[in-house]
Image: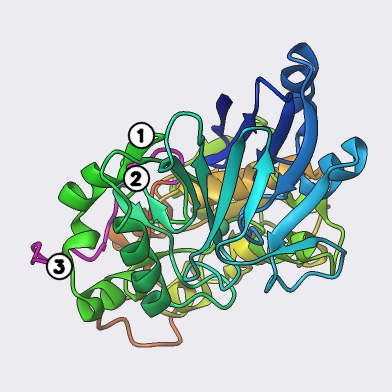
C-alpha cells in the first residue's frame, strides 16, 4: 500500500492519500481546496483516483472533494446522512470500499457532526485487522472534535470515541486536524495510536457527564468565516474565497492607536456576540470572525479598519482576510480587548460581566492552545 498524510499549516487540517501499489487505485480523504497539490502525487506513481471521501461537511476549510472527484471521474463519497445539495455516494456503517487488495471500512462516528465517519484501513494480505484509522474530527490527538458545529452532539461524541477505543492498541490514528479550533486541547502531533490515547488522553478517562460538560463549556470561538465555508461545503453557497489562503502582512498596533485613531476609523470587534456583550471598546461594532465573509458588505472599504478581539490572534487573521479581499486600510490591535481593559480604560457592555464565559480565547496559530479562561480537565477516572 501507499499512504501519505498531507498537513495544511494554515488551517491545521490533514488530508490523506491512500493507494494500492498493486492495482494503482487511490483514494483521497478530506482534500483541501488547493487540489493542485495532489496531482503530482497521483501522476508520479501512476495512481488512478477512484474515491474522494469527505469524512464530514467541514466548517473550517473549503473542501476540494467535488473538484477533485469531477476532474478525475472519481466517486465522491460521504456518509449517507450528509445533508448537501449535490450528488454523492452515500456510505453506510460497516460498508467496505475495495481499493486493490485494501479495504476501507466505514465506521459511523457522529458527534462533531451527525454525518461524520471514520475510515478503517485494512490490508488483508498482511492482517485481517485494521492497522490504521482515519478519524476525521472524532478522535484527535490528545482531544476530541468539538460538538457545536451544525448538529453535533457531545453525548454522541462520547459513544463514538468509546467505539473507537475498542479497537486494538496498535491501530494508528490519523485525525482530520492536528491544530486549530476544531478541538481545544490538541497535542500538535499529527498522529497517535489507539493504545496511547486510551492511556493518556484526559478526556478519554472521563465518564459521560463530565465528558459532555468539558466539551460544551469553554469552547473556542467559531472559526474564521465558518458560516460561508460550511454553506459552500453543503452546496447552498459558492463562496470559496472565504478561505484564508494568504498571509498578507498586517500592521499590529497597540491600544494607544485606538485613542489616536481618525474619527472615521471603524473598530471592528470580531469576537462572538456573547463576548462582545460582556464588554467592548466604546463605539466598536461586532462582526464575529465566523460571519465576516457573509457580512463583508457591512465593513466599509473607504474607512480605516482596526480589528480587535480578546487578545489579538483572531483580529490578526480577520485583518489578513480583509487584506486578502482588497481592504487596504486595515490594522489589528495587538493585545485586544484584554489589554484595553487592563489599562483601566472604560468598556461598554450590554450584559453583566459575571460568571464563566462559554467562549474561551485560544491562540489559533499553534497547537497546545494558550488559554485565558479555559476549563481545567478534571482528574482521570476509570472508564
Ligand atoms: Fe470538522
Where residue 72 appears, x then y in whole percent?
Answer: 88, 36
Q: Nearer the viewer, residue 301 or 231?
A: 231
| For the residues bearing labels 2 and 1, Cβ distance under 8 angstroms | yes
* Residue 46 showing in the rendered view: yes
Q: Nearer the viewer, residue 263 or 194?
A: 194
- For label 3, the SS is loop
Mark 3 — residue? 383
Above-or-below relation of 3 to 91: above
- For label 1, the SS is loop
Please tell me which of labels 2 and 3 falls first in the chain: 2
As drawn, the label of residue 189 is: 1
Q: Nearer the viewer, residue 138 or 195?
A: 195
Where residue 241 appears, x then y in whole percent?
Answer: 81, 48
Where residue 318 appears, x then y in whole percent?
Answer: 62, 50
Mark 2 — residue? 141
Q: Counting other residues with Cα less than 10 Å from the Cα at mark 3, is it few (<14), some (14-19), or many (20 or more)? A: few
Q: Residue at x 67, y 43 (%)?
A: 98
Q: How is the image coloured?
A: rainbow
Question: Which residue extends farthest bottom?
Answer: 351
Q: Nearer the viewer, residue 188 or 317?
A: 188
Over which residues does the magenta segment extend? 364-383
Mark pair 2, 1: CA separation: 7 Å
Amino acid at each position: 500500500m501507499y499512504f501519505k498524510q498531507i498537513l495544511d499549516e494554515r488551517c491545521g487540517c490533514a488530508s490523506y492519500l491512500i493507494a494500492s501499489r498493486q492495482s494503482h487505485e487511490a483514494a483521497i480523504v478530506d482534500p483541501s481546496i488547493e487540489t493542485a497539490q495532489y496531482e503530482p502525487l497521483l501522476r508520479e506513481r501512476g495512481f488512478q483516483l477512484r474515491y474522494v471521501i469527505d469524512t464530514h461537511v467541514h466548517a473550517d476549510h473549503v473542501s476540494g472533494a467535488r473538484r477533485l472527484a469531477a476532474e478525475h471521474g472519481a466517486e465522491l463519497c460521504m456518509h449517507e446522512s450528509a445533508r448537501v445539495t449535490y450528488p454523492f455516494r452515500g456510505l453506510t456503517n460497516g460498508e467496505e470500499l475495495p481499493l486493490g487488495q485494501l479495504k476501507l471500512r466505514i465506521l459511523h462516528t457522529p458527534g462533531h457532526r451527525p454525518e461524520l465517519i471514520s475510515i478503517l484501513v485494512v490490508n488483508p494480505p498482511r492482517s485481517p485487522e485494521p492497522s490504521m484509522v482515519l478519524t476525521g474530527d472524532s478522535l484527535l490527538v490528545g482531544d476530541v472534535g468539538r460538538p457545536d458545529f451544525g448538529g453535533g452532539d457531545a453525548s454522541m461524541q462520547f459513544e463514538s470515541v468509546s467505539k473507537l477505543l475498542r479497537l486494538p492498541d496498535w491501530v494508528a490514528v490519523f485525525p482530520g486536524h492536528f491544530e486549530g479550533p476544531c478541538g481545544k486541547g490538541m497535542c500538535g502531533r499529527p498522529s497517535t495510536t489507539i493504545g496511547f490515547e486510551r492511556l493518556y488522553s484526559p478526556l478519554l478517562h472521563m465518564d459521560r457527564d463530565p465528558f459532555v460538560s468539558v466539551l460544551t463549556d469553554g469552547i473556542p470561538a467559531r472559526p474564521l468565516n465558518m458560516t460561508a465555508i460550511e454553506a459552500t461545503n453543503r452546496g447552498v453557497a459558492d463562496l470559496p474565497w472565504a478561505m484564508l489562503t494568504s498571509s498578507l502582512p498586517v500592521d499590529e498596533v497597540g491600544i494607544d492607536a485606538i485613542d489616536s485613531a481618525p474619527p472615521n476609523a471603524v473598530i471592528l470587534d470580531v469576537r462572538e456576540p456573547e463576548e462582545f456583550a460582556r464588554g467592548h471598546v466604546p463605539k466598536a461594532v461586532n462582526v464575529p470572525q465566523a460571519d465576516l465573509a457573509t457580512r463583508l458588505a457591512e465593513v466599509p472599504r473607504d474607512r480605516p479598519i482596526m480589528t480587535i478581539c480578546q487578545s489579538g490572534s483572531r483580529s490578526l487573521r480577520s485583518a489578513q482576510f480583509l487584506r486578502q479581499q482588497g481592504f487596504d486600510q486595515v490594522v489589528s490591535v495587538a493585545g485586544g480587548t484584554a489589554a484595553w481593559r487592563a489599562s483601566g480604560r472604560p468598556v461598554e457592555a450590554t450584559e453583566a460581566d459575571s460568571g464563566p464565559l462559554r467562549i474561551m480565547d485560544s491562540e489559533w496559530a499553534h497547537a497546545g492552545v494558550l488559554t485565558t479562561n479555559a476549563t481545567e480537565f478534571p482528574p482521570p477516572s476509570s472508564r
